[in-house]
Image (tube, rainbow, N blue to C red):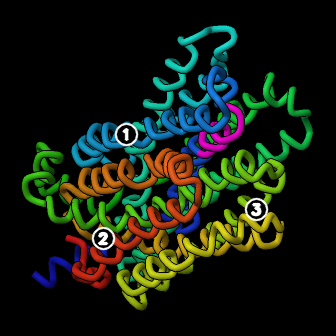
């Protein structure tokens, strides 16, 4: 048995692609898809209340715009089910190409949408439909990007390798923030509302082309090839996960809720809060988010690597506790309206998020066996997204409307992080376990 394991490990090492190309293949898809997602989220906070929901007061219009934000999360489990099944049946690489193309086409069509003024009620309906498809594609992308690096890479560096895909959201958000900041700087507010908001959607075409070129050069993962050769692939991966691995689903989903709420609050809701409630400039808000995105992107792989040495639970848990504390300092710093303190609030929040997000991908992937790993990881990630980040901006806006104070929003985020702390406390460490 040991001899067979060594032969399989040697075969996997021989098939391992160049680390740089593997990392890029993992990063590029999630970067593109979160760029598309972040462009929508930021425009929902800035102008969609005027373009697609113009008959409501500013805060109510923002709430409606964020409701379409939630649609993108609600559709993720649909993508998780469809692409999770395909990923465990036909391979990781096949699904990664399909989701990349689907997200690129959907985002391009968003840039062509007519506004409420010219199309009436059909306009927000088309927006919601495209948002649904966009979320489904993202629901299928994440697990594939993670497994591409986890199942190809060094088993002793799973935390670091899986964190490459985790850099995509911050890099995508950074690209989206930078592009929107540049456009708002070059154009007048009227020009931005009239046509400038469409430009970031069209820019994703270049990222799609680059992503396709990179991914074509990466072969299927050795672990999937092994179960293919052994004829041990799952025939119904989704039902097998639900019946036989429901505890892993709860664990994988539970650890995701806290960082997801923290990220949505720090990025999507804070942008709306700074510009709509505090009346600060878009440029200041987008600059602070850009700096926070840089901190997030560059600390994610560091914390992922740290989890290889110290364990996932230690690094992840430290981030959850620090995040719980920081949520009660976050809004007081924003309310000072001092640029340096606003930047500090967002940079620290997104660095704390990286402490959890860096180890997260490996942590979730390690909960499931190879034959259902794509389906299991997809479902855990996407289902938690609904009760985590999907409704977070909408709930935060509603809490602010109801209580008139951001303390209610901080308490909501703290509760989500507390759930993550409890799950981490009771779960077993798997960082050093061998993947089957």
326 or 28, which is in the foreground? 326
Asked if residue 215 can be seen in this view, the reply is no
Tell me where residue 193 appears, x and y as whole percent: 79, 27
Q: Quadrant of the N terminus?
A: bottom left
- Real-space Cα distance between discs 3 and 1? 28 Å
Magenta segment, which residues?
38-48
Q: Quadrant of the C terminus?
A: bottom left
Residue hosting label 2: 11
Residue at the spot x=64%, y=15% of the render? 116
- Real-space Cα distance between discs 2 and 1? 40 Å
Q: Magenta includes 46?
A: yes
Query: In the rendered image, which quarter is residue 114 located in?
Result: top right
- Real-space Cα distance between discs 3 and 2? 47 Å
Looking at the picture, does residue 331 appear above or below residue 230? below
Nearest to N terminus: mark 3 or mark 1: 1
Residue at the spot x=31%, y=50% of the render? 383
Question: Which label is found at residue 288?
Answer: 3
Tell me where residue 32 appears, x and y as whole percent: 59, 46
Residue hosting label 1: 74
Nearest to N terminus: mark 2 or mark 1: 2
Specify whether 362 is left or right of 301.
left
- Alpha-carbon neighbours of circle 3 within 10 Å: few (<14), some, or many (≥20)? many
Q: Magenta includes 432?
A: no
Which element type, helix, strand or loop, lies under badge 3? helix
Which element type, helix, strand or loop, lies under badge 2? helix
Which element type, helix, strand or loop, lies under badge 1? helix
Residue at the spot x=83%, y=50% of the render? 281
Tell me where residue 314 appears, x and y as whole percent: 39, 87
- Alpha-carbon neighbours of circle 1 within 10 Å: few (<14), some, or many (≥20)? many
């Amino acid at each position: 048995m040991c001899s067979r394991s060594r032969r399989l490990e040697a075969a996997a090492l021989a098939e391992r692609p160049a680390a740089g190309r593997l990392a890029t293949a993992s990063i590029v898809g999630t970067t593109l898809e979160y760029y598309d997602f972040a462009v929508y989220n930021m425009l929902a906070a800035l102008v969609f209340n005027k373009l697609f929901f113009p008959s409501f007061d500013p805060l109510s219009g923002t709430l409606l715009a964020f409701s379409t934000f939630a649609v993108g999360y609600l559709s993720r489990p649909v993508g998780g089910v469809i692409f999770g099944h395909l990923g465990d049946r036909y391979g990781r690489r096949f699904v990664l190409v399909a989701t990349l193309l689907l997200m690129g086409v959907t985002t391009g069509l968003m840039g062509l949408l007519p506004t409420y003024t010219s199309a009436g009620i059909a306009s927000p309906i088309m927006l919601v439909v495209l948002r649904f498809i966009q979320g489904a594609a993202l629901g299928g992308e994440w697990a594939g990007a993670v497994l591409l690096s986890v199942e190809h890479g060094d088993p002793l560096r799973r935390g670091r390798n899986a964190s490459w895909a985790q850099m995509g959201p911050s890099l995508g958000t950074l690209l989206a923030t930078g592009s929107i900041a540049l456009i708002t700087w070059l154009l007048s507010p009227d020009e931005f509302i009239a046509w400038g908001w469409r430009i970031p959607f069209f820019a994703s075409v270049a990222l799609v082309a680059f992503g396709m070129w990179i991914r074509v050069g990466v072969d299927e993962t050795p672990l999937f090839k092994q179960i293919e050769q052994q004829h041990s692939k799952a025939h119904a991966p989704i039902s097998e996960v639900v019946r036989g691995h429901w505890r892993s689903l709860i664990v994988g989903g539970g650890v995701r809720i806290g960082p997801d709420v923290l990220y949505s609050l720090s990025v999507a809701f804070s942008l709306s809060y700074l510009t709509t409630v505090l009346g600060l400039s878009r440029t200041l808000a987008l600059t602070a988010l850009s700096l926070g995105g840089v901190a997030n992107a560059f600390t994610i792989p560091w914390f992922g690597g740290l989890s290889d040495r110290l364990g996932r639970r230690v690094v992840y848990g430290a981030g959850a506790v620090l995040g719980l504390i920081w949520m009660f300092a976050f809004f007081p710093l924003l309310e000072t309206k001092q640029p340096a303190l606003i930047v500090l609030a967002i940079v620290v929040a997104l660095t704390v998020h990286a402490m959890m997000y860096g180890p997260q991908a490996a942590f979730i992937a390690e909960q499931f066996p190879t034959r259902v790993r794509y389906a299991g990881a997809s479902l855990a990630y996407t289902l938690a997204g609904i009760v985590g980040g999907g409704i977070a901006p909408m709930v935060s806006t509603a809490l602010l409307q109801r209580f008139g104070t951001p303390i209610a929003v901080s308490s909501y985020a703290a509760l989500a992080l507390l759930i993550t702390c409890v799950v981490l406390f009771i779960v077993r460490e798997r960082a050093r376990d061998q993947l089957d």
